Image (cartoon, grey):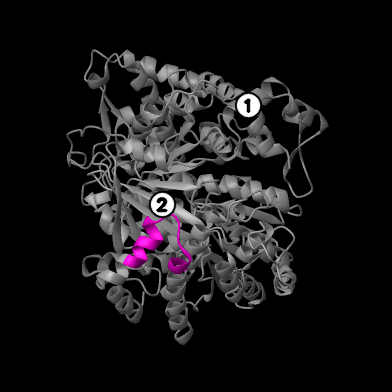
Amino acid sequence: MVSNEKSILTRIKNNEQVKKSIEELLYIKSELSNFEAEYLLSVALVFIREYEDNSNNKMFIEYAYFIIAKVSYKTNDYRALYDFSVNYGYFPIAKKILDLNLIPNLTMNHIFTELAIEEFSDGTKVQTLEQKNVFSAVLEDENKSVSFIAPTSYGKSELIFQHLKKNNNKDMVGIIVPTKALIDQVYRDSKAIVKDRKIIIHDQNFEPSSDHRVLAIVTQERALRLLDSGMVFDILYIDEAHELLNFDFRNGFSNRSLLLTRVINVSRAKNSELLELYLSPAIVSDESLTIRNSLKVANHKISNNLKLLDIDFLNNSGENLIYDRFLGDFIFQKEYKRTSDYIFEKSLNKNLHFLYRPKYIEEYSNILSNSLPTVFEIPSEILELIEELKLIVHPKFKLIKYLEKGLVYLHGRMPQVIKNYLLKYVRESDFITHFVANSVVLAGMNLPIDNLFYLSGYANIRDLYNLIGRVNRLNEIFSPQSKDISRIFIPIHFIEMNQFPQNKNGNLKKKIEKLRGNYKDEIKNPMLDNATIDANNREMADEIVSSEIEIIKSFDNPKFKEKLLRAGAQQLLNYSEQGMNILETRIQKIIKPIDDDYLLETIKKLFFDDFKESDFKPQYNAERLKHAETINYYKLFIKGLNIYSLSERIERLVGYWNSKIDEKYMIYVGTQFGEVTKESKRYFEPRNKVYVDLDEHIGDMDYLYNLAILKLQTDEDYVGHEITLLLNTLLEFEIITQEQFDRLIYGTTSQDDIRILRLGISRTIYRKLKKDNKVNNIIFDNYGNARADHELKKYIEIQTGIEKFELEQYFIS
């Protein structure tokens, strides 16, 4: 908010009589008289005039729009909103008003205007004037680096595919996304549209000798491995590009934003004609995305948002307050004795409950489920899902009893295939009305959310705006099926509960107040031009920048340090110069070949044994590999991963824990679900509660089975990240062979088997295909995409549940 805007709005707020009359009519009264409506519209007109005099006063036009929309809704007279929408290019609203016959006496002017609006329609949806202009500007921009900044649901995916179509002569294309959940969504969208290139979602899907036209939908880690494999990108689409700005100096070289800038810089070094399109709902400044020593990104931005925020706050005392983000004022509504009463009263069809910690998600889901009424008529598809989860996960999986009340929770510590499957029900089942999740699941996801309950999160206001943008997506508001123009009002409910505090004990009310004004980009990544680095981090920032420059310069012929960084060991272990010298000498002297049964022991011996504290600073998660018991555990874990189903692995793990009940046994689960510390130099700090004490849960089988589900996914992620990065380093230095790597990770060296496993399908599904003799019915088209032949299509058609879901996902276009 510019100072002039803030000054005028604050004066209104401080004038008790004016403020009270505006707030009474906007928020308290449900119906308005003609006089009251005219009063509010005259206030809106004043703000419009102020905006017309100075278009930098964006808050004034937003406030005018908010007032006009509220008046139209309360009086059921939409003429003013229609006129405003036509005059300011908000054509989807004007078209919806006409489609719903909300203006009773149409004139020739309305008819001619409707014909003019058709120019902004593609047959399925109507664009705003600004949206159409910005889309065209992006597609016509001849710059190599271009950004598209727009509120969530303003057609980011559509723009990517239009841009790709325009540049269809480019062969190697990457869509870089921040999460595995988003890979699944973009992959489904791409399969429906892109028919003339191979679509891959993992670096190991790439076959350099035969793949000549590729669309890679990957995270930055997988993109780096593709570059290492020889891929040269022609176009990079950087989705959720605001992730570039983040940086935590405690994580050093393992920051994902650093890896993302490395992807861009290496791609530029390999291809001087590289095209880049950055997409984000949450970048403020034109210069925030500029990488060091590079040209500025050409910025295209949609500023106006058709959606309006209805913000409620339920504090610890049970007071319900409406927040006017224009005047910055809280208006009392009523009191609630119980939080559950408020939630029941405010709930709509699809309610997202947001908490940032997985542990909070599970605890809150239990509280919410216990307060929801029993449902006596559960739809057959939900009953079938419940029975299926009992079979493929476990009968004691706590989510099962929540499903009976239309509640689903998801977070990053749940098995990926289960998450994807449950998201299908969140999207498609009207019975699922409550969805509890965090940003790991939601980043960039398109879900039918029409109501947000926000309980706890991080301080970053940019991420909060991004989350709010997930509610009532434009294609839902303006779809032919939607009969309610009031969905332009986005209901956001902030709920204060002592057991679910904000990150670092932040204040929820102050967070709400930050929604009043504009936020600034916090640029912390030292690889960006305008990064703000405090004095304590300056030395490390300089080291990071220097190392990154050297990595890019020597990418195809790296020195030892750069190879160590590129392969992944350095980002986990942070060797000093002395430590790297010791490691280099060890690698030179290592005796090869390494026995297959000794691969993980080699990681321990090579990277951890006999190093001094001054030689390296391992991340505490990676440091676990210095213990022989950790090595032995993961050898058995990887073996079980390739042999047993999820339900079998859960049973075996709980059985193992029960065999340890007479011992003092600690279960490592990480910070998200840890309850106690373990005394050691690195784990003694209170914040590092990464263990569960088995003694505290003896006999509680419900707890142990659900802990096993979390533990197995935690360990699978550990294998996929820490162990795989160190194995990649062994590969990089030719200490082990690709066959050894494949034999350990996949349990086979058959290239036919590995080619299909690398598609991303679960091992359980692959074992089923093998058992049913259907592997040979998987065919590959001219571009290398996996397809089902006629027999496999018939086979998939008769499958049910998650098996059919997964098979269709990978083999049916």
Report if residue 735 lies within the magenta region.
no
Residue 145 in the image: x percent, y percent?
A: 56, 73
Q: Is residue 86 left or right of residue 350?
A: right
Residue underneath mark 2? 492
Q: In this rendering, does residue 247 appear at all?
A: no
Name the residue at the right extreme.
790
Q: Disc 2 on helix, strand or loop? A: strand
Q: Is residue 44 left or right of residue 539?
A: right
Residue underneath mark 1? 801
Q: Is residue 602 left or right of residue 793?
A: left
**Magenta segment boundaries in residue numbering:** 21-37
Q: Quadrant of residue 523?
A: bottom left
Q: Is residue 601 above or below residue 528?
A: above
Q: Quadrant of the C terminus?
A: top right
Disc 2 and disc 1: Cα gap in Å? 34 Å
Depth check: give the residue in front, 592 or 572.
572
